[in-house]
Image: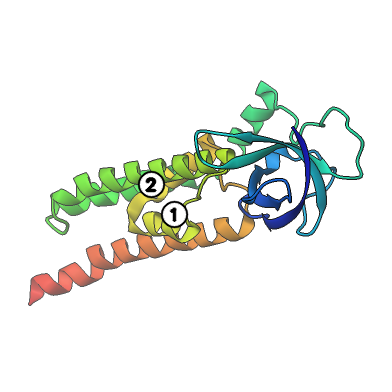
């Protein structure tokens, strides 16, 4: 059923918002992929839409477009990438990550061998990296389906705790958070802090403790 309403709330970062319509008692959820305008939605904008109900989660708006725009086939929000284009994005991955990861793993292994790190740190490292990749996957899925997102601070905390290699893998393979400049700046800060803490423990703090 075709309805009219007004964009009541719009979250540009998460890519979803809510429409208020006199024909529906509850605010109606809509996602950026269902928006048919040429520009981004804005609060207070009058829109037309088709209303559906999904799995008891409340009303959802589909085919949302500005009220003054005539009906026409919706242009794709993003052109599909060819295999060559996709390969090009992967080839543009930061070349520092692989050697840095190898050096980091070697330091962990040496630290355990030299009794400067407990053995359980290896299992904990595997666990935190699995959790990190899962957190990125869940956030990517939430972004695509309009569900609640994982906070960026949580993703950065996983990186700081040693999950930064899995974070880099998730960013490249899922194509998630890889082009957001502010996120990438904070991500590399967590990598730097984690590696500095590891080096400080292995070559400064732990030797001092052994001398006591």
Q: Which residue is mark 1?
A: 155
Q: Earlier in the sequence, mark 2 or mark 1?
A: 2
**Quadrant assignment, res 129:** top left
Q: Residues within 10 Å of mark 2 (few under 14, many from 20)?
A: many
**Residue at x 60% of width, y 61% of height:** 182
Q: Which mark is residue 137?
A: none
The furthest residue to the bottom: 212
**Residue at x 75% of width, y 59% of height:** 43
Which quadrant of the rendered structure holds the C terminus? Answer: bottom left
Picture coordinates of residue 41 (x, y %)?
A: 77, 51
The furthest residue to the left: 212
Picture coordinates of residue 134 (x, y %)?
A: 39, 41
**Regarding mark 2 in the picture, which secondary structure is present there?**
helix
Q: Tell me how the rendering is colored.
A: rainbow
State the residue in front, 48 or 10.
Answer: 48
Drawn side of residue 116 relative to residue 164, left or right: left
Q: Which residue is mark 2?
A: 132
**Residue at x 23% of width, y 62% of height:** 202
Q: Are marks 2 and 1 in contact (CB under 8 Å)?
A: yes
Drawn side of residue 124 relative to residue 148, left or right: left
């Amino acid at each position: 059923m075709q309805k009219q309403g007004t964009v009541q709330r719009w979250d540009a970062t998460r890519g979803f918002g809510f429409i208020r319509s006199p024909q529906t008692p509850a605010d109606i959820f809509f996602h950026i992929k269902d928006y048919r305008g040429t520009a981004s939605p804005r609060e207070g904008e009058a829109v037309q839409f088709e209303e559906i109900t999904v799995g008891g989660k409340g009303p959802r708006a589909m085919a949302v477009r500005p009220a003054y725009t005539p009906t026409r086939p919706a242009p794709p929000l993003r052109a599909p990438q060819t295999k060559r284009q996709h390969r090009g994005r992967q080839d543009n991955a930061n070349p520092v990550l692989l050697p840095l990861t190898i050096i980091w793993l070697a330091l962990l292994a040496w630290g355990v061998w030299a009794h400067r790190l407990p053995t359980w740190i290896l299992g904990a490292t595997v666990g935190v990296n699995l959790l990190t990749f899962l957190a990125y996957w869940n956030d990517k899925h939430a972004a695509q389906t309009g569900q609640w997102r994982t906070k960026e601070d949580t993703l950065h905390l996983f990186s700081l705790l040693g999950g930064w290699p899995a974070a880099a893998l998730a960013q490249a393979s899922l194509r998630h958070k890889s082009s957001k400049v502010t996120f990438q700046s904070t991500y590399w800060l967590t990598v730097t802090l984690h590696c500095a803490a590891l080096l400080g423990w292995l070559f400064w703090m732990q030797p001092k403790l052994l001398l006591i």
